[in-house]
Amino acid sequence: MQGISSAEMHVSDGDQRNAPAGEKPDMNRERYAEGKPNAHSDTDSKDQRTLSNRLAAAQKAEAEEEESNDAEFKPPTQVARDHGNKPSRGAVVDEEIMNDEAEYLKNKGKA
C-alpha cells in the first residue's frame, strides 16, 4: 500500500467540470406553478390534517357524490333516445324492471 499519491491520479479528465453559465439548462427552464387546484385529495389519510377537518371533508365529499348521482340519473333507454337511436332490448327490460320495482315499493309503503 502506497501512502503518497501521485498528482496524475487526481487530474480532471473533463467529466467533472461545471458547464459555462450560459449553457446551464436550469437557468432557462420555466418554474412550476405552486398550489395547483385538486393537487391533493381532501380525504387523504396520510395528510397532516386534524380528525375533525378530515371528517368534515369526508362528509362534504359524500354529500357532493350523492348530489351528482341524483342529478345524473337517467333511465336506461334515455341515452339511446338522446342520440336518436332505438334502445336495446336489454335497456328496455332494465327500464321495465325498474318501473315494476318502483311500483312494488310504492304499493308496499301504502299497505
Image (spheres, rainbow, N blue to C red):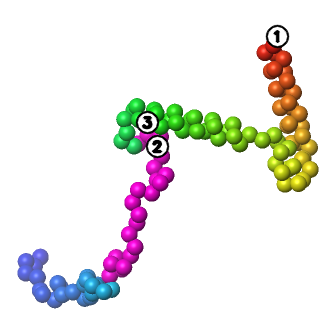
Image location of residue 104, percent across then percent down: 84, 21
Q: Nearer the viewer, residue 3 or 72?
A: 72
| Cα–Cα span, label 2 and label 3 | 7 Å
Residue type (three-letter) at the residue carrying disc 2? Asp
Residue 94 in the image: above or below residue 1: above
Element class at badge 1: loop
- 90 left or right of 13 in image: right
Residue 88 in the image: above or below residue 33: above
Query: Magenta-highlighted stretch: main secondary structure?
Result: loop
Image location of residue 38, percent across then percent down: 49, 52
Q: Quadrant of residue 36?
A: bottom left
Q: Residues within 10 Å of mark 3 (few under 14, many from 20)?
A: some
Magenta residue check for 27: yes
Q: Earlier in the sequence, mark 2 or mark 1?
A: 2
Magenta stretch in the rendered image:
24-46
Q: Quadrant of residue 6?
A: bottom left
Question: Disc 3 vs disc 1: Cβ atoms closer than 8 Å?
Answer: no
Q: Earlier in the sequence, mark 2 or mark 3?
A: 2
Q: Quadrant of the C terminus?
A: top right
Residue type (three-letter) at the residue carrying disc 1? Ala
Query: In the image as oriented, which residue stretches furthest toward the top?
Result: 111
**Residue at horizontal 85 percent and vertical 37 percent from the top:** 94
Q: Which residue is mark 3?
A: 54
Magenta residue check for 77: no
**Residue at horizontal 33 percent and vertical 78 percent from the top:** 27
| Cα–Cα span, label 2 and label 1 | 45 Å
| Cα–Cα span, label 3 and label 1 | 43 Å
Which disc, if any, is residue 111? 1
Which disc, if any, is residue 42? 2
